[in-house]
Structure formats: C-alpha cells, structure tokens
C-alpha cells in the first residue's frame, strides 16, 4: 500500500511540475503565481502549499528531478567503456530526455536566465554539463573537447531554436541527434 501512496505522490508532483512549467512558459516566471498554478491544476491553494510553499520550491524540485535524470546517464556512462558506442548511447538518452518535460524546462531556463541564476543548484547543472562533455569527447584534444560541447549544444538547440531552425520538433531532434553523433565519432 505504501508504494501506491508514493506513486500517487510522485504522479501529483509530476503533474504540478508540468502545469507549473506550462504557466511559467506562457506567463513568464516573474508573472506566474501559485494561485494560477493551483487553478490550472483545479486544486485549492492550500492543497498546492501542502506540496510546495513557493514557485521557487517548484522550480527547484523540477531542477532536482532533471539533475537526477542526468546523474543516472552520467553514472551509466562511467560504468561503460569510453568508446563510440557509449558516447552515442549517452546522446540518445539525452535526446530522449529532451523530447519530454526536460526539453520544456531547458527552453524555460534559456528564456528565464534570471530565475535560473537565483536557483542554488544552477552551478551544479554546469558541472553536470561538464561531466557530460568529458564523457562525450572523442579524443583528449582541444578539437575533441570542442566537438563534445558542440554535440551537447546541438541537442539543446533543437528544442530552443524552433523559430530559427524550422521543421517539427521531431525533425529538429532527429537532425540534432544525427549531427551530435557525427561530432562524437572517432577521428
């Protein structure tokens, strides 16, 4: 029975995260309110306060979930041989994350840099990106390190630059993954 309760709590948190991201994205983080999030969720503000005391708490929780997902990828990659197959699998796992709420969060983060700067865990995110870049580098050269960072940038760009790049989300994601795969290839 405890698993069910935990499952419902997780589902509720995920639902709050999704609605909050929608509100943050539509209204802007500064203009978004807990009242508006509660209304969209069709719950009372006290019910929302039971889970989160502020929109900052919601944002930090979303960020923690994302960090956990990235940590899982990093841990997996570190347990594998440092080869092309592992690098490509890291990219595919990141791309899959970007296709979900992670993509929406990264778009939000890029559009709301001030809110992200105030987030205590933002510097940890930079460290995670550095770890991913190290895992993705095809060689320990300046060129290899540049290629790894460009591969990461391609994945993020696909979701955040729709207007400039055109195409559907799926088309951009596939093109970014193909480009990133080429960048992390040996040689």
Image (cartoon, helix red, strand yellow):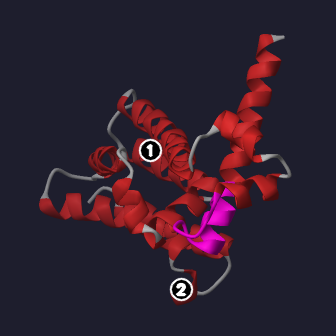
Q: Position of residue 99 (x, y in %)?
A: 63, 59
Q: Quadrant of the N terminus?
A: top right
Q: Are marks 1 and 2 in contact (CB under 8 Å)?
A: no
**Residue 8 covered by magenta stretch:** no
Numbered range of the magenta stretch: 20-33
Please identify, in this view, whether the residue under mark 1 or under mark 2 is nearer the observer.
2
SS class, disc 1: helix
SS class, disc 2: helix
Tell me which residue sits at (47%, 52%) in the image: 91
Which of the pair 74/16 is nearer the observer? 16
**Residue 23 covered by magenta stretch:** yes
Which of the pair 124/58 is nearer the observer? 58
Q: Position of residue 160 (x, y in %)?
A: 52, 73
Decide if residue 182 is in sight here.
no
Q: Position of residue 45 (x, y in %)?
A: 74, 47
**Left or right of residue 175: residue 137:** left
């Amino acid at each position: 029975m405890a698993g069910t309760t935990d499952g419902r709590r997780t589902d509720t948190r995920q639902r709050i995260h999704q609605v909050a991201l929608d509100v943050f994205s539509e209204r802007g983080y500064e203009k978004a309110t807990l009242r508006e999030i509660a209304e969209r969720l069709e719950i009372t503000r006290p019910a929302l306060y039971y889970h989160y005391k502020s929109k900052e708490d919601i944002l930090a929780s979303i960020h923690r979930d994302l960090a956990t997902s990235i940590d899982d990828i990093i841990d997996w990659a570190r347990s594998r041989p440092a080869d092309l197959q592992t690098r490509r699998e890291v990219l595919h796992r990141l791309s899959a994350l970007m296709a979900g709420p992670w993509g929406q969060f990264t778009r939000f983060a890029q559009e709301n840099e001030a809110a992200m700067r105030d987030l205590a865990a933002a510097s940890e995110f930079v460290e995670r990106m550095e770890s991913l870049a190290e895992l993705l580098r095809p060689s320990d050269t300046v060129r290899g390190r540049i290629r790894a960072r460009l591969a990461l940038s391609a994945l993020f760009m696909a979701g955040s630059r729709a207007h400039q790049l055109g195409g559907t989300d799926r088309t951009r994601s596939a093109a970014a993954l193909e480009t990133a795969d080429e960048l992390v290839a040996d040689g």
